């Protein structure tokens, strides 16, 4: 399952980089429209759209590949992280792992469920001097 996760991540990264390049190569519609109102660079209102169709379709294909990879990564990470018991909810996983992350250690002779003895000594009496009253 790990090799499949790595392949999907590599495809997602490749699709993201190609999509970034395709978006940067495309011209905005505002630039074509501005060119037709004074500079005379284009013959029609929106300019030549022959290459825009190919670029926009290939960008849409890359976006679809990217979203499919994202959904499959979400599915694979949920399958890999599912606990052996319970419904597999994120909240259930947090409840299972929370005691281990709290730092409290149970002594070796103590039963599970009894509070751990504190390693720090009990605080001494207050060292703040008191003002005698009459």
Image: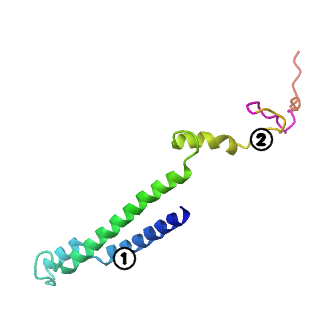
Q: Quadrant of residue 64?
A: bottom left
Q: Residue at 53% of width from left, 61% of height from top?
A: 1
Residue farthest to the bottom, as pictured: 41
99 to the left or right of 35? right
| Disc assigned to residue 111 | none
Residue at which label 1 appears: 21
Q: Residue at 54% of width from left, 40% of height from top?
A: 91
Quadrant that contains the C terminus: top right
Residue farthest to the top, as pictured: 134
Crowding at label 1, few (<14), some or many (≥20) Cα neighbours within 10 Å? few
**What secondary structure do most residues of the magenta stretch adopt?**
loop
Q: Position of residue 57 (x, y in %)?
A: 25, 71
Secondary structure at badge 2 equals loop
Crowding at label 2, few (<14), some or many (≥20) Cα neighbours within 10 Å? few
Q: In the rendered view, would you say 41 is above or below 18?
A: below
Residue at which label 2 appears: 105
**Is 53 colored magenta in this rendering?**
no
Decide which of 44, 7 is in the foreground and name it: 7
Residue farthest to the left, as pictured: 44
> Is there CB contact under 8 Å for labels 1 and 2?
no
Decide which of 39, 27 is in the foreground and name it: 27
Q: Residue at 52% of width from left, 43% of height from top?
A: 88
Q: Which residues are magenta?
A: 112-122
Secondary structure at badge 1 equals helix
How many marks do you count on the picture? 2
61 to the left or right of 128? left
1 vs 2, front mark: 2
**Is 118 colored magenta in this rendering?**
yes
Q: In the rendered view, would you say 68 is above or below 129?
A: below
Q: Position of residue 29 (x, y in %)?
A: 21, 72
Q: In the rendered view, would you say 47 is above or below 16?
A: below
């Amino acid at each position: 399952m790990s090799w499949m996760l790595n392949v999907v991540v590599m495809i997602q990264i490749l699709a993201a980089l190609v999509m970034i390049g395709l978006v940067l190569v495309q011209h905005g519609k505002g630039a074509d429209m501005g060119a037709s109102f004074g500079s005379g660079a284009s013959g029609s209102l929106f300019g030549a759209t022959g290459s825009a169709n190919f670029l926009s379709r290939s960008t849409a294909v890359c976006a679809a590949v990217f979203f499919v990879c994202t959904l499959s990564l979400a599915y694979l990470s949920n399958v890999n992280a599912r606990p052996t018991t319970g419904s597999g909810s994120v909240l259930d996983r947090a409840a299972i792992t929370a005691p281990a992350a709290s730092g409290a250690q149970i002594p070796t002779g103590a039963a599970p469920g009894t509070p751990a003895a504190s390693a720090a000594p009990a605080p001494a009496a207050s060292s703040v001097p008191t003002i005698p009253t009459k």
